[in-house]
Amino acid sequence: MNMPRILQIGSLSGSPNADQEIARRYQVLEYWKASDPIRFLRDEAQDIEVVATSAMTGCTAAIIDALPRLRAIVSWGVGFDSIDVDRARARGVVVSNTPDVLNDCVADLAWALLLGCARQIAWGDRNIRAHRWTERAAGLPLAPRVHHKKLGVVGLGRIGEAIAQRGRGFDMEVGYHNRNPRRDVSHRYFDSLVELATWSDFLVVATVGGSSTRHLVNEPVLRALGPAGIVVNIARGTVIDEAALVSLLSQGLVGGAALDVFEHEPQVPEALKHMDNVVLMPHVGSATIETRRAMLDLVLDNLQSFFSTGKLLTPI
Ligand code: 8YV
């Protein structure tokens, strides 16, 4: 059987057997294994029309430019800040991601982080494992209550909405900041992020990454959140000014942080690892059995759709 050829930028190891399932349907050029990538593209990939990649591996302008017949980039993951979408558009190359299928799992993780940080779950677990129950219990700082508090969402998109919906289950008031207010929701809109942070007890970052949101959550926003406030980030590390966050946390000027994403992954600032009011996770918002399967299925469906109709199912 003559299988279509595609170029895959990196292993989709986040979905079990993804590479094998793709390789069963396509002749895959494995870019990440090439010892000389420039030469590999020049010698092997000049006829390539479709690239498969992920939110993590992305696709640079240099790769797009090196593929003269490229027509589509199919990506695993909802974020596309690692793909040079402007260059793709300029070349008439269409791009797809995997929206919606991961909203609920990412929202669940945001809530696990929020509760874990506020109710000191990782901290308590560490102390029990270190046989410090009695020793530390005496000095245990009381945790803030979560229910009936104010939840601020930075970026009320599809994931932000799933986070807000869960907040309603905790009887919370929900506020949000977007560039523009949404007419279809009743949550309180703040056109100033500093004002949202001032109002919020918990500030959850759920906006897109990339240059448009770089350091949106900056020092003034974090100062406004204040010594009792907790910031949660399940979006992209670049959205928060990480150096400012570390500095304010170490001065007690921000109450706590629960982070699934970092500015320079997989590097995590050393100082954060020593703070008891911080919860850290290694970028696993979508990493559940069901959601990672759904993400892979959407990649396979996008590939199949493009090869059979010339159209992507979930173009960005
Ligand atoms: C993944 C993500 O965990 O979809 C995204 O944009 O960030 C997550 O679903 C990430 O892509 C892992 O690389």
Image (tube, rainbow, N blue to C red):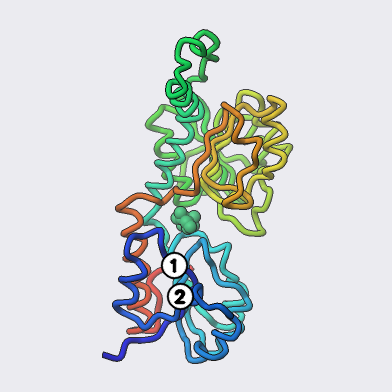
**Observer-nearest of 241 and 179:** 241
The residue located at (59%, 55%) in the rendering is 209
**Observer-nearest of 311 and 191:** 311
Kind of residue at badge 1: Ser
User: Which residue has dot 2 on it?
Assistant: 8
User: Which residue has dot 1 on it?
Assistant: 11
Other-residue count near label 1 (Cα within 10 Å), few / some / many at <14 / 14–19 / ≥20:
some
Q: Position of residue 195 (x, y in %)?
A: 66, 35
Left or right placement of residue 66 versus residue 184 in this view: right
Q: SS class of the residue under badge 1?
A: loop
Q: SS class of the residue under badge 2?
A: strand
For the residues labelled 1 and 2, the Cα–Cα distance comes to: 7 Å
* Above or below, 46 relative to 134: below
Other-residue count near label 2 (Cα within 10 Å), few / some / many at <14 / 14–19 / ≥20:
many
The residue located at (32%, 71%) in the rendering is 20
**Observer-nearest of 32 and 170:** 32
Q: Residue furthest top?
A: 138
Which disc number belongs to residue 195?
none
Can residue 131 be seen here? The reply is yes
Q: Position of residue 79 (x, y in %)?
A: 51, 59
Q: Residue furthest left?
A: 1
Q: Position of residue 37 (x, y in %)?
A: 57, 79
- Can you tell which quarter of the image residue 24 is in? bottom left
Kind of residue at badge 2: Gln
The residue located at (50%, 89%) in the rendering is 44
**Observer-nearest of 143 and 107:** 143
* Above or below, 54 relative to 137: below
Q: Position of residue 205 (x, y in %)?
A: 56, 43
Left or right placement of residue 285 versus residue 41 in this view: left
Contact (Cβ within 8 Å) of mark 1 with mark 2: yes
The quadrant of the rendering that contains the N terminus is bottom left
